């Protein structure tokens, strides 16, 4: 009877990246930014201070 091992790695080579949510940014009033995740009507993040990310 032949024997062997099974690998947990995918045959595709590279693992797939996790799906990231779409985030909308709204300004509810001057100086107040609100971030809303698509499909999530129960949660949001509001901030008085936001900065542009640098790469």
Image (spheres, helix red, strand yellow):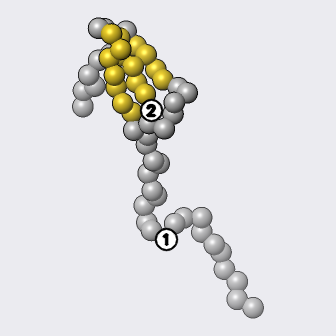
**Residue topped by disc 2:** 37
SS state under label 2:
strand
Image quadrant where one finds the C terminus: top left
> Where is the N terminus found, in terms of image quarters?
bottom right
The residue identified by callout 1 is 11
* Number of the front mark, 1 or 2: 2
Identity of the residue drawn at 44% across and 36% down: 38
Lower sequence index among marks 1 and 2: 1
Residue at point 51% right, 30% down?
41
Residue 35, compared with residue 28, is above or below; it is: below
The location of residue 26, given as percent across then percent down, is: 34, 22
Residue 13 position by quadrant: bottom left
Location of residue 51 (image quadrant) = top left
Under tag 1, what secondary structure?
loop
- In this view, the residue farthest toward the bottom is 1
Question: Which residue is located at x 46 percent, y 20 percent?
Answer: 45
């Amino acid at each position: 009877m032949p024997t062997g091992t099974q690998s947990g790695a995918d045959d595709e080579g590279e693992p797939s990246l996790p799906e990231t949510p779409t985030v909308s940014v709204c300004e509810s009033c001057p100086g107040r930014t609100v971030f809303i995740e698509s499909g999530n009507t129960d949660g949001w993040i509001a901030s008085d201070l936001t900065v542009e990310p640098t790469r």
